[in-house]
Image (cartoon, rainbow, N blue to C red):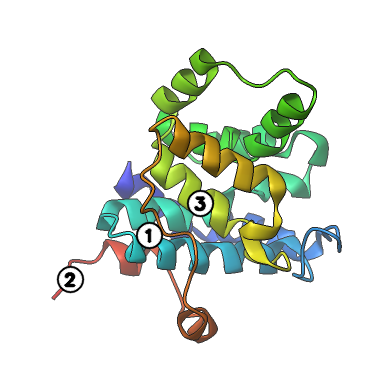
Amino acid sequence: MIAVLVKLTQAPLFQAEYARLKDVTLSEERHASANAYEHSELVRRTAVMLGKINKRSADELVILDALGMAHDMGKAGDRSQHAEESMRILQRYGVNDPAFLALIRFHDIALSWHNSHLRGEAPSDKAWRRLATKVDMPLFCIFMAADRADKTGGWRANEPVVWFFDEAMRRGLLPKETVFDVPEETANQAPEVTARKLAEPQR
């Protein structure tokens, strides 16, 4: 899968489709980024930084980078079903790995699950276990935190995400030592990140 993701993120046609996000505006209440492209670029950088802080493998850094690039691509089409549309775009380019697609499919699940919790219909233990079989929960949560990087206060200001992390930790699905905050001095450096660079052997 890693070779497919590296090739994907370097493909001119995919990059052109990704650039369409520059024309997609976002809710000012939820995002500080001017458009979905700027948001995705920030998420890419933040996700990889968090991956490094949490000592994730080189392959997992490639996954985090590709997730940042691909997770909202569907918003250039049907925004009401953007996760499904993002998956369809990826599949058109030959990305069919169930584990990667699941990370795309469920990346906004904290909101719907938290709403269910507030209605007194919290997701069951079985639902949590089922989700944990579909995604690498620590990697998933690292990405979820990165996806809130352009919200004032970051993930800590997002009640559904805070609740999701607490529940995952309480259930033993997420190590309590997982780091979700990027040091300010590191975040301000905003290094360029590409899957190709991440996949290169370290010397």
**Label 1 packing within 10 angstroms: few (<14), some (14-19), many (20+):** many
Left or right of 196? Residue 39 is: right
Is 58 displayed left or right of 182 in the figure? left
Element type at marker 2? loop
Depth check: 130 or 87 in front? 130
* Residue located at (65% from left, 55% from top): 17
- Mark with earlier residue (2, 3): 3
Q: Position of residue 156 (x, y in %)?
A: 63, 58
Q: Residue at x 41, y 32 (%)?
A: 99
From the viewer's perspective, is the residue at label 2 or at label 3 nearer? 3
Residue 188 pos. (x, y %): 54, 84
Q: From the image, which quarter does the C terminus lie in?
A: bottom left
Q: Position of residue 30 (x, y in %)?
A: 79, 58
**Mark linked to residue 202:** 2
* Contact (Cβ within 8 Å) of mark 2 with mark 3: no
Which amino acid is tagged 3? Answer: Phe
Find disc 1 in the rendering and name its residue.
51
Q: Which residue is mark 3?
A: 143
Check disc 3 and report its element: helix, strand or loop. helix
Are the residues tagged 1 and 2 within 8 Å (C-beta)?
no
What residue is rendered at 41% in x and 46% in y? 139
> Is 27 on the left-hand or right-hand side of 4?
right
Disc 2 versus disc 3: distance between alpha carbons?
Answer: 23 Å
Q: Earlier in the sequence, mark 1 or mark 2?
A: 1
